[in-house]
Image (cartoon, rainbow, N blue to C red):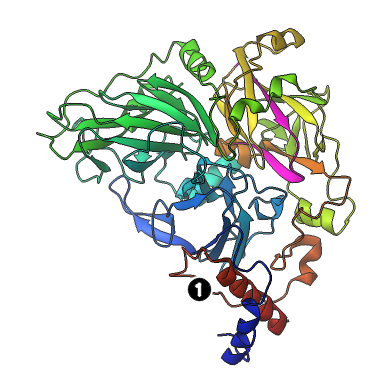
Amino acid sequence: MLPGVPFSCLFFFLPLVWLLPGSLAGDPYVFFDWTVSYVSASPLGVKQQVIGVNGKFPGPVLNLTTNWNVVVNVKNDLDEPLLITWNGVQHRKNSWQDGVSGTNCPIPAGWNWTYQFQVKDQIGSFFYFPSLSFQRAAGGYGGIIINNREVIPLPFGLPDGDVHIFIGDWYSKSHKELRKDVENGADLGVPDGILINGFGPYRYDQALIPDGITYQIINVEPGKTYRFRVHNVGISTSLNFRIQNHNLLLVETEGSYTAQQNYSNMDIHVGQSYSFLVTMDQNASTDYYIVASPRFVNSSDWAKVTGVAVLHYSNSQGPASGPLPDPPNDYDKYFSMNQARSIRWNVSAGAARPNPQGSFKYGQITVTDVYVIQNRPPELIDGKLRTTLNGISYLPPTTPLMLAQQFKIPGVYKFDFPNKLMSRPPKLDTSLINGTFKGFMEIIFQNNDTTVQSYHLDGYAFFVVGMDFGVWTENSRGTYNKWDGVARCTTQVFPGAWTAILVSLDNAGIWNLRAQNLDSWYLGQEVYLGVVNPEIDATEVPLPDNAIYCGLLSALQKNQAQRIDFSGAESIPDVSKTIFFLLIFSLIGTLVR
Protein backbone atom coordinates (compact mmCIF):
# COMPACT_ATOMS: atom_id res chain seq x y z
CA MET A 1 0.00 0.00 0.00
CA LEU A 2 1.01 3.62 -0.48
CA PRO A 3 1.88 5.56 2.67
CA GLY A 4 -1.15 7.58 3.77
CA VAL A 5 -3.61 5.74 1.50
CA PRO A 6 -6.12 3.77 3.57
CA PHE A 7 -6.89 0.31 2.20
CA SER A 8 -10.60 1.03 2.62
CA CYS A 9 -10.37 3.87 0.10
CA LEU A 10 -9.69 1.38 -2.67
CA PHE A 11 -12.81 -0.62 -1.89
CA PHE A 12 -14.95 2.50 -1.71
CA PHE A 13 -14.97 2.33 -5.51
CA LEU A 14 -15.55 -1.39 -5.84
CA PRO A 15 -19.39 -1.28 -5.91
CA LEU A 16 -19.22 1.32 -8.69
CA VAL A 17 -17.37 -1.11 -10.97
CA TRP A 18 -20.34 -3.39 -11.28
CA LEU A 19 -22.62 -0.49 -12.23
CA LEU A 20 -20.55 0.77 -15.15
CA PRO A 21 -22.22 0.23 -18.54
CA GLY A 22 -20.47 -2.37 -20.68
CA SER A 23 -18.39 -3.66 -17.78
CA LEU A 24 -19.30 -7.26 -18.59
CA ALA A 25 -18.53 -7.11 -22.32
CA GLY A 26 -15.75 -6.14 -24.70
CA ASP A 27 -12.23 -7.27 -25.53
CA PRO A 28 -10.39 -9.06 -22.71
CA TYR A 29 -7.52 -7.58 -20.72
CA VAL A 30 -4.43 -9.49 -19.63
CA PHE A 31 -1.93 -8.32 -17.03
CA PHE A 32 1.78 -9.05 -16.74
CA ASP A 33 4.21 -8.00 -14.03
CA TRP A 34 7.85 -7.85 -15.11
CA THR A 35 11.13 -7.02 -13.45
CA VAL A 36 14.00 -6.35 -15.86
CA SER A 37 17.32 -6.93 -14.12
CA TYR A 38 20.82 -8.28 -14.51
CA VAL A 39 21.10 -12.01 -14.01
CA SER A 40 24.04 -14.35 -14.13
CA ALA A 41 24.30 -16.81 -17.04
CA SER A 42 26.99 -18.84 -18.80
CA PRO A 43 25.81 -19.10 -22.40
CA LEU A 44 29.30 -19.92 -23.70
CA GLY A 45 30.58 -21.70 -20.59
CA VAL A 46 31.89 -18.58 -18.87
CA LYS A 47 29.76 -16.75 -16.32
CA GLN A 48 28.68 -13.27 -17.40
CA GLN A 49 26.02 -10.67 -16.66
CA VAL A 50 23.00 -10.72 -18.97
CA ILE A 51 19.62 -8.95 -18.91
CA GLY A 52 16.73 -11.12 -17.81
CA VAL A 53 12.98 -10.56 -17.47
CA ASN A 54 11.62 -11.98 -14.22
CA GLY A 55 14.98 -13.70 -13.84
CA LYS A 56 14.66 -15.52 -17.17
CA PHE A 57 17.01 -15.30 -20.16
CA PRO A 58 15.39 -15.22 -22.71
CA GLY A 59 12.36 -13.62 -21.10
CA PRO A 60 8.80 -14.95 -20.87
CA VAL A 61 6.53 -15.28 -23.90
CA LEU A 62 3.51 -12.99 -24.19
CA ASN A 63 0.75 -15.35 -25.39
CA LEU A 64 -2.09 -13.16 -26.65
CA THR A 65 -5.08 -13.24 -28.99
CA THR A 66 -6.23 -10.71 -31.58
CA ASN A 67 -7.82 -7.58 -30.04
CA TRP A 68 -6.78 -8.34 -26.46
CA ASN A 69 -5.80 -5.39 -24.31
CA VAL A 70 -2.37 -5.86 -22.78
CA VAL A 71 -1.09 -4.29 -19.55
CA VAL A 72 2.60 -4.89 -18.82
CA ASN A 73 4.02 -3.38 -15.64
CA VAL A 74 7.80 -3.10 -16.11
CA LYS A 75 10.13 -2.50 -13.15
CA ASN A 76 13.59 -1.31 -14.19
CA ASP A 77 16.13 -2.94 -11.90
CA LEU A 78 19.05 -2.14 -14.21
CA ASP A 79 21.59 0.56 -13.41
CA GLU A 80 20.63 2.67 -16.44
CA PRO A 81 17.43 3.87 -18.14
CA LEU A 82 15.29 1.32 -19.98
CA LEU A 83 12.60 1.10 -22.65
CA ILE A 84 10.97 -2.06 -24.01
CA THR A 85 9.81 -2.04 -27.63
CA TRP A 86 7.38 -4.55 -29.11
CA ASN A 87 8.95 -5.47 -32.45
CA GLY A 88 6.12 -5.62 -34.99
CA VAL A 89 3.16 -5.08 -32.65
CA GLN A 90 1.36 -2.23 -34.34
CA HIS A 91 -0.21 -0.18 -31.48
CA ARG A 92 -3.07 1.22 -33.55
CA LYS A 93 -3.10 5.02 -33.10
CA ASN A 94 -1.00 4.63 -29.96
CA SER A 95 2.68 5.30 -30.53
CA TRP A 96 2.82 6.39 -26.87
CA GLN A 97 3.44 2.71 -26.08
CA ASP A 98 6.06 2.08 -28.75
CA GLY A 99 8.98 2.01 -26.35
CA VAL A 100 11.62 3.88 -28.38
CA SER A 101 13.40 7.13 -27.59
CA GLY A 102 11.34 9.22 -30.02
CA THR A 103 8.06 8.37 -28.35
CA ASN A 104 8.83 7.70 -24.67
CA CYS A 105 11.02 9.12 -21.95
CA PRO A 106 13.15 6.28 -20.57
CA ILE A 107 12.14 4.47 -17.39
CA PRO A 108 14.80 5.58 -14.89
CA ALA A 109 16.72 2.98 -12.92
CA GLY A 110 14.64 1.83 -9.96
CA TRP A 111 11.35 3.04 -11.46
CA ASN A 112 8.52 1.14 -13.06
CA TRP A 113 6.22 2.04 -15.92
CA THR A 114 3.06 0.36 -17.16
CA TYR A 115 2.60 -0.23 -20.88
CA GLN A 116 -1.04 -0.45 -22.00
CA PHE A 117 -1.92 -1.30 -25.60
CA GLN A 118 -4.28 -3.37 -27.71
CA VAL A 119 -3.14 -5.92 -30.29
CA LYS A 120 -5.83 -4.65 -32.62
CA ASP A 121 -6.57 -6.59 -35.83
CA GLN A 122 -3.28 -8.48 -35.74
CA ILE A 123 -1.97 -12.06 -35.61
CA GLY A 124 1.48 -13.60 -35.78
CA SER A 125 4.93 -14.11 -34.30
CA PHE A 126 6.96 -11.22 -32.90
CA PHE A 127 9.41 -10.44 -30.11
CA TYR A 128 10.17 -7.67 -27.62
CA PHE A 129 13.55 -6.27 -26.57
CA PRO A 130 15.17 -3.29 -24.79
CA SER A 131 15.63 -0.47 -27.30
CA LEU A 132 18.16 1.80 -25.58
CA SER A 133 21.91 1.93 -25.08
CA PHE A 134 22.88 -1.30 -26.88
CA GLN A 135 21.04 -3.31 -24.19
CA ARG A 136 19.70 -5.87 -26.66
CA ALA A 137 23.29 -7.15 -26.91
CA ALA A 138 22.86 -8.36 -23.30
CA GLY A 139 19.45 -9.98 -23.73
CA GLY A 140 16.17 -8.69 -22.33
CA TYR A 141 14.26 -10.19 -25.27
CA GLY A 142 11.37 -12.64 -25.43
CA GLY A 143 8.59 -13.84 -27.70
CA ILE A 144 5.15 -12.50 -28.56
CA ILE A 145 2.41 -14.74 -29.95
CA ILE A 146 -0.83 -13.19 -31.21
CA ASN A 147 -3.28 -16.02 -31.86
CA ASN A 148 -6.26 -16.01 -34.21
CA ARG A 149 -9.65 -15.41 -32.69
CA GLU A 150 -11.67 -18.62 -32.53
CA VAL A 151 -13.95 -17.44 -35.36
CA ILE A 152 -10.97 -17.20 -37.76
CA PRO A 153 -9.62 -20.63 -38.79
CA LEU A 154 -5.91 -21.25 -39.22
CA PRO A 155 -4.91 -21.86 -42.85
CA PHE A 156 -3.26 -25.12 -41.71
CA GLY A 157 -3.97 -27.90 -39.22
CA LEU A 158 -3.62 -27.06 -35.55
CA PRO A 159 -0.02 -27.96 -34.60
CA ASP A 160 0.70 -30.37 -31.78
CA GLY A 161 2.90 -27.81 -30.04
CA ASP A 162 4.54 -24.38 -30.21
CA VAL A 163 8.33 -24.01 -30.08
CA HIS A 164 10.08 -20.65 -29.74
CA ILE A 165 13.61 -20.43 -31.13
CA PHE A 166 15.69 -17.30 -30.47
CA ILE A 167 18.87 -17.23 -32.54
CA GLY A 168 21.48 -14.50 -32.50
CA ASP A 169 25.15 -13.58 -32.45
CA TRP A 170 26.63 -13.19 -28.98
CA TYR A 171 29.66 -11.46 -27.47
CA SER A 172 31.29 -12.20 -24.12
CA LYS A 173 31.83 -8.45 -23.68
CA SER A 174 29.11 -6.60 -21.82
CA HIS A 175 26.73 -4.37 -23.75
CA LYS A 176 28.44 -1.38 -22.13
CA GLU A 177 31.83 -2.44 -23.49
CA LEU A 178 30.37 -3.11 -26.93
CA ARG A 179 28.64 0.27 -26.83
CA LYS A 180 31.91 2.01 -26.06
CA ASP A 181 33.70 0.11 -28.84
CA VAL A 182 31.10 1.20 -31.38
CA GLU A 183 31.25 4.81 -30.14
CA ASN A 184 35.02 4.73 -30.62
CA GLY A 185 34.71 3.52 -34.19
CA ALA A 186 35.74 -0.09 -33.58
CA ASP A 187 34.20 -2.86 -35.65
CA LEU A 188 32.22 -5.44 -33.68
CA GLY A 189 34.33 -8.21 -35.17
CA VAL A 190 33.58 -11.91 -35.05
CA PRO A 191 31.13 -12.79 -32.26
CA ASP A 192 32.11 -15.29 -29.58
CA GLY A 193 29.24 -17.55 -30.50
CA ILE A 194 25.73 -17.97 -31.87
CA LEU A 195 23.16 -18.63 -29.16
CA ILE A 196 19.98 -20.68 -29.50
CA ASN A 197 17.47 -19.82 -26.76
CA GLY A 198 20.25 -18.34 -24.65
CA PHE A 199 22.41 -21.47 -24.84
CA GLY A 200 25.71 -22.14 -26.53
CA PRO A 201 26.40 -24.87 -29.09
CA TYR A 202 26.11 -28.62 -28.73
CA ARG A 203 29.60 -30.13 -28.90
CA TYR A 204 29.33 -31.46 -32.42
CA ASP A 205 33.09 -30.94 -32.98
CA GLN A 206 35.40 -31.43 -30.01
CA ALA A 207 38.16 -29.45 -31.72
CA LEU A 208 35.93 -26.37 -32.11
CA ILE A 209 33.59 -26.50 -29.11
CA PRO A 210 35.03 -26.65 -25.59
CA ASP A 211 33.52 -28.97 -23.02
CA GLY A 212 31.13 -27.69 -20.34
CA ILE A 213 28.76 -25.60 -22.50
CA THR A 214 25.06 -26.15 -21.83
CA TYR A 215 23.03 -26.51 -25.02
CA GLN A 216 19.34 -26.41 -25.91
CA ILE A 217 17.40 -29.68 -26.31
CA ILE A 218 13.99 -29.56 -28.04
CA ASN A 219 11.97 -32.64 -27.05
CA VAL A 220 9.41 -33.89 -29.58
CA GLU A 221 7.15 -36.88 -30.22
CA PRO A 222 7.44 -38.92 -33.43
CA GLY A 223 4.75 -38.28 -36.02
CA LYS A 224 3.65 -34.98 -34.54
CA THR A 225 3.85 -31.54 -36.18
CA TYR A 226 5.16 -28.51 -34.31
CA ARG A 227 5.08 -24.81 -35.07
CA PHE A 228 8.62 -23.42 -34.78
CA ARG A 229 8.61 -19.64 -34.32
CA VAL A 230 12.17 -18.53 -35.11
CA HIS A 231 13.44 -15.02 -34.31
CA ASN A 232 16.85 -13.49 -35.10
CA VAL A 233 17.39 -11.42 -31.96
CA GLY A 234 21.10 -10.83 -32.57
CA ILE A 235 23.16 -7.70 -33.09
CA SER A 236 24.27 -7.69 -36.70
CA THR A 237 24.66 -11.18 -38.17
CA SER A 238 22.40 -12.78 -40.76
CA LEU A 239 21.89 -16.45 -39.90
CA ASN A 240 20.88 -19.54 -41.84
CA PHE A 241 18.47 -21.76 -39.91
CA ARG A 242 17.99 -25.46 -40.64
CA ILE A 243 17.05 -28.73 -38.95
CA GLN A 244 18.90 -31.84 -40.05
CA ASN A 245 16.78 -34.13 -42.29
CA HIS A 246 13.60 -32.09 -41.69
CA ASN A 247 11.69 -29.77 -44.00
CA LEU A 248 10.65 -26.29 -42.89
CA LEU A 249 7.12 -25.56 -44.13
CA LEU A 250 6.88 -21.76 -44.05
CA VAL A 251 3.41 -20.62 -42.93
CA GLU A 252 3.76 -17.14 -41.42
CA THR A 253 6.12 -14.23 -41.05
CA GLU A 254 5.66 -11.17 -38.82
CA GLY A 255 1.89 -11.13 -38.89
CA SER A 256 1.12 -12.47 -42.37
CA TYR A 257 0.23 -15.98 -43.41
CA THR A 258 2.41 -16.99 -46.34
CA ALA A 259 1.92 -19.26 -49.31
CA GLN A 260 2.98 -22.61 -47.86
CA GLN A 261 6.32 -23.75 -49.25
CA ASN A 262 8.92 -26.22 -48.04
CA TYR A 263 12.47 -25.05 -47.46
CA SER A 264 15.48 -27.07 -46.41
CA ASN A 265 16.92 -23.94 -44.78
CA MET A 266 16.02 -20.27 -44.38
CA ASP A 267 18.18 -17.15 -44.17
CA ILE A 268 16.86 -15.11 -41.27
CA HIS A 269 18.22 -11.60 -41.02
CA VAL A 270 18.54 -9.42 -37.93
CA GLY A 271 15.14 -8.60 -36.43
CA GLN A 272 13.16 -11.02 -38.60
CA SER A 273 10.67 -13.65 -37.40
CA TYR A 274 9.30 -16.74 -39.20
CA SER A 275 6.89 -19.58 -38.41
CA PHE A 276 7.54 -23.06 -39.81
CA LEU A 277 5.57 -26.27 -39.46
CA VAL A 278 8.01 -29.12 -38.84
CA THR A 279 6.75 -32.70 -38.91
CA MET A 280 8.66 -35.32 -36.93
CA ASP A 281 8.74 -37.84 -39.77
CA GLN A 282 12.20 -39.39 -39.29
CA ASN A 283 13.04 -42.80 -37.85
CA ALA A 284 14.94 -41.28 -34.90
CA SER A 285 17.95 -43.56 -35.17
CA THR A 286 19.72 -40.62 -33.53
CA ASP A 287 18.98 -37.08 -32.41
CA TYR A 288 19.11 -34.33 -35.03
CA TYR A 289 20.97 -31.04 -35.26
CA ILE A 290 19.22 -27.68 -35.15
CA VAL A 291 21.65 -25.20 -36.71
CA ALA A 292 21.99 -21.42 -36.95
CA SER A 293 25.13 -20.43 -38.86
CA PRO A 294 26.43 -17.03 -40.02
CA ARG A 295 25.79 -15.88 -43.57
CA PHE A 296 27.64 -13.42 -45.83
CA VAL A 297 30.93 -13.72 -43.95
CA ASN A 298 34.24 -14.45 -45.61
CA SER A 299 36.61 -15.25 -42.76
CA SER A 300 37.55 -18.70 -41.47
CA ASP A 301 37.29 -17.27 -37.95
CA TRP A 302 33.51 -17.49 -38.28
CA ALA A 303 33.56 -21.30 -38.49
CA LYS A 304 33.76 -21.57 -34.69
CA VAL A 305 30.61 -19.55 -34.02
CA THR A 306 27.92 -21.82 -35.38
CA GLY A 307 24.91 -22.25 -33.08
CA VAL A 308 23.79 -25.86 -32.60
CA ALA A 309 20.88 -27.26 -30.58
CA VAL A 310 19.50 -30.80 -30.48
CA LEU A 311 16.13 -32.09 -31.70
CA HIS A 312 15.38 -35.11 -29.52
CA TYR A 313 12.66 -37.60 -30.43
CA SER A 314 11.22 -39.46 -27.44
CA ASN A 315 12.21 -42.74 -29.14
CA SER A 316 15.67 -41.58 -30.23
CA GLN A 317 18.30 -44.33 -30.32
CA GLY A 318 21.33 -42.14 -29.67
CA PRO A 319 22.96 -38.68 -29.69
CA ALA A 320 23.43 -36.53 -32.78
CA SER A 321 26.81 -37.08 -34.43
CA GLY A 322 28.69 -36.50 -37.63
CA PRO A 323 28.93 -33.33 -39.73
CA LEU A 324 26.34 -30.56 -39.56
CA PRO A 325 23.87 -30.26 -42.46
CA ASP A 326 25.42 -28.15 -45.20
CA PRO A 327 24.62 -24.42 -45.39
CA PRO A 328 23.95 -22.65 -48.68
CA ASN A 329 26.95 -21.65 -50.76
CA ASP A 330 28.10 -18.34 -49.30
CA TYR A 331 29.50 -17.27 -52.66
CA ASP A 332 26.15 -17.62 -54.42
CA LYS A 333 24.86 -14.12 -53.76
CA TYR A 334 21.61 -14.79 -55.62
CA PHE A 335 20.53 -17.74 -53.44
CA SER A 336 19.34 -15.66 -50.50
CA MET A 337 17.72 -13.02 -52.69
CA ASN A 338 15.83 -15.62 -54.72
CA GLN A 339 14.74 -17.28 -51.50
CA ALA A 340 13.46 -13.95 -50.18
CA ARG A 341 11.59 -13.30 -53.46
CA SER A 342 9.92 -16.71 -53.17
CA ILE A 343 8.15 -15.75 -49.93
CA ARG A 344 4.62 -14.80 -50.94
CA TRP A 345 1.46 -13.68 -49.21
CA ASN A 346 -1.31 -16.25 -48.77
CA VAL A 347 -3.97 -14.11 -50.44
CA SER A 348 -6.79 -16.58 -49.76
CA ALA A 349 -6.28 -16.91 -46.00
CA GLY A 350 -8.09 -14.87 -43.38
CA ALA A 351 -5.99 -13.55 -40.53
CA ALA A 352 -7.13 -10.97 -38.00
CA ARG A 353 -10.42 -10.58 -39.91
CA PRO A 354 -12.52 -13.14 -41.83
CA ASN A 355 -11.83 -11.62 -45.24
CA PRO A 356 -8.84 -12.94 -47.23
CA GLN A 357 -5.52 -11.19 -46.69
CA GLY A 358 -5.37 -10.48 -50.41
CA SER A 359 -8.63 -8.51 -50.37
CA PHE A 360 -6.46 -5.42 -49.84
CA LYS A 361 -5.42 -4.76 -53.44
CA TYR A 362 -2.23 -2.88 -52.67
CA GLY A 363 -1.07 -3.00 -56.27
CA GLN A 364 -4.03 -0.87 -57.40
CA ILE A 365 -3.46 2.03 -54.98
CA THR A 366 -1.94 5.27 -56.24
CA VAL A 367 1.38 6.12 -54.61
CA THR A 368 1.38 9.57 -52.98
CA ASP A 369 5.00 9.82 -51.74
CA VAL A 370 8.28 8.24 -52.85
CA TYR A 371 11.42 8.06 -50.70
CA VAL A 372 14.69 6.58 -51.94
CA ILE A 373 16.65 6.05 -48.70
CA GLN A 374 20.35 5.37 -49.07
CA ASN A 375 22.70 4.16 -46.38
CA ARG A 376 26.47 4.28 -46.48
CA PRO A 377 29.29 2.84 -44.37
CA PRO A 378 30.06 4.83 -41.21
CA GLU A 379 31.57 8.25 -41.95
CA LEU A 380 33.06 11.06 -39.90
CA ILE A 381 30.64 13.75 -38.76
CA ASP A 382 31.98 16.35 -36.32
CA GLY A 383 34.99 14.13 -35.67
CA LYS A 384 33.03 10.96 -34.82
CA LEU A 385 32.07 7.95 -36.92
CA ARG A 386 28.33 7.97 -37.59
CA THR A 387 25.92 6.12 -39.84
CA THR A 388 23.44 7.95 -42.05
CA LEU A 389 20.27 7.65 -44.09
CA ASN A 390 20.21 10.08 -47.01
CA GLY A 391 23.20 11.82 -45.48
CA ILE A 392 21.51 12.47 -42.12
CA SER A 393 22.54 10.81 -38.87
CA TYR A 394 19.61 10.93 -36.47
CA LEU A 395 20.19 13.09 -33.39
CA PRO A 396 17.83 12.05 -30.56
CA PRO A 397 16.40 15.12 -28.79
CA THR A 398 16.25 15.22 -24.99
CA THR A 399 12.47 15.69 -25.27
CA PRO A 400 10.80 12.79 -27.13
CA LEU A 401 9.08 13.74 -30.37
CA MET A 402 5.62 12.69 -29.21
CA LEU A 403 5.84 14.90 -26.13
CA ALA A 404 7.20 17.82 -28.16
CA GLN A 405 4.24 17.44 -30.53
CA GLN A 406 1.73 17.11 -27.69
CA PHE A 407 2.96 20.26 -25.91
CA LYS A 408 3.70 22.15 -29.14
CA ILE A 409 7.34 22.78 -28.24
CA PRO A 410 9.08 24.47 -31.19
CA GLY A 411 12.52 23.62 -32.48
CA VAL A 412 12.73 20.00 -31.27
CA TYR A 413 12.39 18.49 -34.75
CA LYS A 414 11.69 19.39 -38.37
CA PHE A 415 9.59 17.65 -41.02
CA ASP A 416 12.29 18.02 -43.65
CA PHE A 417 13.84 14.59 -44.16
CA PRO A 418 14.88 14.54 -47.86
CA ASN A 419 13.25 12.04 -50.21
CA LYS A 420 16.63 11.22 -51.76
CA LEU A 421 20.33 11.61 -51.01
CA MET A 422 21.30 15.27 -51.27
CA SER A 423 24.56 16.64 -52.66
CA ARG A 424 25.87 17.98 -49.35
CA PRO A 425 28.10 16.82 -46.51
CA PRO A 426 26.54 14.40 -44.02
CA LYS A 427 25.16 15.96 -40.85
CA LEU A 428 23.57 15.26 -37.48
CA ASP A 429 19.93 16.32 -37.37
CA THR A 430 16.49 15.56 -35.93
CA SER A 431 14.74 15.42 -39.27
CA LEU A 432 11.43 13.57 -39.73
CA ILE A 433 9.62 12.15 -42.74
CA ASN A 434 6.36 14.01 -43.29
CA GLY A 435 3.86 11.24 -43.99
CA THR A 436 0.45 11.97 -45.51
CA PHE A 437 -2.32 10.48 -43.38
CA LYS A 438 -4.09 7.78 -45.41
CA GLY A 439 -1.50 8.25 -48.12
CA PHE A 440 0.37 5.39 -49.78
CA MET A 441 4.16 5.60 -49.57
CA GLU A 442 6.80 3.87 -51.65
CA ILE A 443 10.16 3.48 -49.90
CA ILE A 444 13.25 2.16 -51.67
CA PHE A 445 16.17 1.16 -49.46
CA GLN A 446 19.46 1.40 -51.35
CA ASN A 447 22.29 -0.36 -49.51
CA ASN A 448 25.64 1.20 -50.34
CA ASP A 449 27.36 -0.61 -47.46
CA THR A 450 29.30 -3.88 -47.71
CA THR A 451 27.11 -5.86 -45.28
CA VAL A 452 23.49 -7.02 -45.25
CA GLN A 453 21.27 -4.50 -43.48
CA SER A 454 17.69 -5.00 -42.35
CA TYR A 455 15.15 -2.23 -41.77
CA HIS A 456 12.08 -2.16 -39.56
CA LEU A 457 9.09 0.19 -39.41
CA ASP A 458 7.14 0.43 -36.15
CA GLY A 459 3.36 0.79 -36.25
CA TYR A 460 2.89 -0.80 -39.67
CA ALA A 461 3.13 -3.84 -41.85
CA PHE A 462 4.49 -3.00 -45.30
CA PHE A 463 4.44 -4.89 -48.59
CA VAL A 464 7.82 -6.11 -49.84
CA VAL A 465 7.34 -5.67 -53.58
CA GLY A 466 10.83 -5.88 -55.08
CA MET A 467 14.55 -6.36 -54.53
CA ASP A 468 17.53 -6.70 -56.82
CA PHE A 469 21.23 -6.04 -57.05
CA GLY A 470 22.47 -2.77 -58.53
CA VAL A 471 21.01 0.72 -58.33
CA TRP A 472 17.25 1.25 -58.24
CA THR A 473 15.81 3.30 -61.11
CA GLU A 474 12.30 4.26 -62.17
CA ASN A 475 12.38 1.29 -64.56
CA SER A 476 12.82 -1.06 -61.59
CA ARG A 477 9.10 -0.71 -60.86
CA GLY A 478 8.49 -3.00 -63.82
CA THR A 479 9.80 -5.90 -61.70
CA TYR A 480 7.55 -5.23 -58.69
CA ASN A 481 5.22 -7.92 -57.36
CA LYS A 482 1.91 -6.08 -57.06
CA TRP A 483 -0.27 -9.09 -56.29
CA ASP A 484 1.07 -11.28 -53.47
CA GLY A 485 4.17 -9.59 -52.06
CA VAL A 486 4.34 -10.51 -48.39
CA ALA A 487 3.31 -7.96 -45.75
CA ARG A 488 5.75 -7.76 -42.84
CA CYS A 489 7.60 -5.24 -40.66
CA THR A 490 11.31 -6.05 -41.23
CA THR A 491 13.05 -6.52 -44.56
CA GLN A 492 16.63 -7.25 -45.57
CA VAL A 493 18.63 -5.16 -48.03
CA PHE A 494 21.62 -6.93 -49.53
CA PRO A 495 24.93 -5.11 -50.03
CA GLY A 496 25.05 -3.31 -53.35
CA ALA A 497 21.33 -3.90 -53.78
CA TRP A 498 17.91 -2.35 -53.20
CA THR A 499 14.61 -3.38 -51.65
CA ALA A 500 11.28 -1.63 -52.33
CA ILE A 501 8.29 -1.56 -49.97
CA LEU A 502 4.81 -0.04 -50.12
CA VAL A 503 3.01 1.08 -46.97
CA SER A 504 -0.48 2.46 -46.35
CA LEU A 505 -0.21 5.31 -43.85
CA ASP A 506 -3.43 4.73 -41.94
CA ASN A 507 -1.93 4.68 -38.42
CA ALA A 508 -1.59 8.17 -36.96
CA GLY A 509 1.41 8.82 -34.73
CA ILE A 510 5.18 9.18 -34.89
CA TRP A 511 6.80 5.88 -35.86
CA ASN A 512 10.38 4.68 -35.82
CA LEU A 513 12.02 3.55 -39.08
CA ARG A 514 15.37 2.00 -38.18
CA ALA A 515 18.21 -0.30 -39.03
CA GLN A 516 17.78 -3.49 -37.03
CA ASN A 517 21.54 -4.06 -37.10
CA LEU A 518 22.34 -2.69 -33.67
CA ASP A 519 25.64 -0.99 -34.51
CA SER A 520 24.11 0.83 -37.50
CA TRP A 521 21.07 1.87 -35.44
CA TYR A 522 23.12 3.05 -32.48
CA LEU A 523 25.31 5.28 -34.66
CA GLY A 524 22.37 7.10 -36.23
CA GLN A 525 20.73 5.00 -38.90
CA GLU A 526 17.11 5.73 -38.03
CA VAL A 527 14.44 8.28 -38.83
CA TYR A 528 10.91 8.89 -37.58
CA LEU A 529 7.85 8.91 -39.79
CA GLY A 530 5.28 11.44 -38.64
CA VAL A 531 1.70 10.68 -39.68
CA VAL A 532 -0.66 13.41 -38.49
CA ASN A 533 -4.40 13.02 -38.76
CA PRO A 534 -5.69 16.50 -39.76
CA GLU A 535 -9.12 15.72 -38.29
CA ILE A 536 -10.13 15.12 -34.69
CA ASP A 537 -10.30 11.37 -34.16
CA ALA A 538 -11.82 10.12 -30.91
CA THR A 539 -10.14 6.73 -31.40
CA GLU A 540 -6.63 8.18 -31.20
CA VAL A 541 -5.12 7.41 -27.82
CA PRO A 542 -4.34 10.52 -25.75
CA LEU A 543 -1.25 11.23 -23.66
CA PRO A 544 -1.21 8.48 -21.02
CA ASP A 545 -1.83 9.49 -17.41
CA ASN A 546 1.38 7.73 -16.35
CA ALA A 547 3.61 9.49 -18.91
CA ILE A 548 7.20 10.05 -17.79
CA TYR A 549 8.51 13.54 -18.51
CA CYS A 550 12.09 14.43 -19.42
CA GLY A 551 14.09 17.00 -21.35
CA LEU A 552 12.32 20.33 -21.64
CA LEU A 553 9.32 18.91 -19.74
CA SER A 554 11.21 17.52 -16.75
CA ALA A 555 9.51 19.97 -14.39
CA LEU A 556 6.18 18.20 -14.99
CA GLN A 557 7.41 14.91 -13.58
CA LYS A 558 5.80 13.80 -10.32
CA ASN A 559 7.37 11.36 -7.89
CA GLN A 560 7.34 7.72 -8.89
CA ALA A 561 4.16 5.98 -7.75
CA GLN A 562 4.52 2.69 -5.93
CA ARG A 563 4.40 -0.36 -8.12
CA ILE A 564 1.20 -2.40 -8.33
CA ASP A 565 1.82 -6.16 -8.29
CA PHE A 566 -0.04 -8.05 -11.01
CA SER A 567 1.59 -11.41 -10.21
CA GLY A 568 -0.99 -14.14 -10.42
CA ALA A 569 -3.30 -11.94 -12.51
CA GLU A 570 -1.96 -12.66 -15.97
CA SER A 571 -5.09 -14.35 -17.31
CA ILE A 572 -7.86 -12.06 -16.10
CA PRO A 573 -10.26 -11.93 -19.08
CA ASP A 574 -13.15 -10.18 -17.29
CA VAL A 575 -13.41 -6.53 -18.29
CA SER A 576 -15.15 -5.70 -15.01
CA LYS A 577 -11.99 -6.72 -13.16
CA THR A 578 -9.99 -4.65 -15.62
CA ILE A 579 -12.02 -1.55 -14.88
CA PHE A 580 -11.47 -2.21 -11.19
CA PHE A 581 -7.70 -2.21 -11.75
CA LEU A 582 -7.88 0.94 -13.86
CA LEU A 583 -9.92 2.68 -11.17
CA ILE A 584 -7.25 1.73 -8.66
CA PHE A 585 -4.63 3.28 -11.00
CA SER A 586 -6.69 6.45 -11.25
CA LEU A 587 -7.36 6.62 -7.50
CA ILE A 588 -3.72 6.09 -6.57
CA GLY A 589 -2.63 8.72 -9.09
CA THR A 590 -5.11 11.19 -7.58
CA LEU A 591 -4.09 10.49 -4.00
CA VAL A 592 -0.37 10.64 -4.75
CA ARG A 593 -0.78 13.99 -6.49
Give the answer, above or below, for where 305 lies relative to 447.
Answer: below
Q: Quadrant of residue 389?
A: top right
Question: With 26 as the anchor, is 244 left or right in this view?
Answer: left
Tell me the residue at 55%/85% (across/down).
1
Label count reads: 1
Between 362 and 153, the residue placed more toward the observer is: 153
Q: Quadrant of the C terminus?
A: bottom right
User: Residue 327 in the image: x percent, y percent?
Assistant: 34, 19
Q: Is residue 377 visible?
A: no
For the stretch drawn in magenta, the main secondary structure is strand
User: Residue 40 in the image: x percent, y percent?
Assistant: 36, 58
Between 541 and 100, the residue placed more toward the observer is: 541
Find out whether residue 415 is within the magenta segment. no
Tell me the residue at 22%/32% (across/down).
223
Range covered by the magenta-colored residues: 496-515
Tell me the residue at 75%/54% (across/down).
400
Give the answer, above or below, for where 549 lies relative to 220.
Answer: below
Residue beneath disc 1: 565
Give the answer, above or below, for where 259 lies relative to 534.
Answer: above
Give the answer, above or below, for where 439 lies relative to 129.
Answer: above
Q: Quadrant of residue 114?
A: bottom right
Q: Is residue 451 visible?
A: yes
Find out whether residue 508 is within the magenta segment. yes
Q: Amino acid at mark 1?
A: Asp
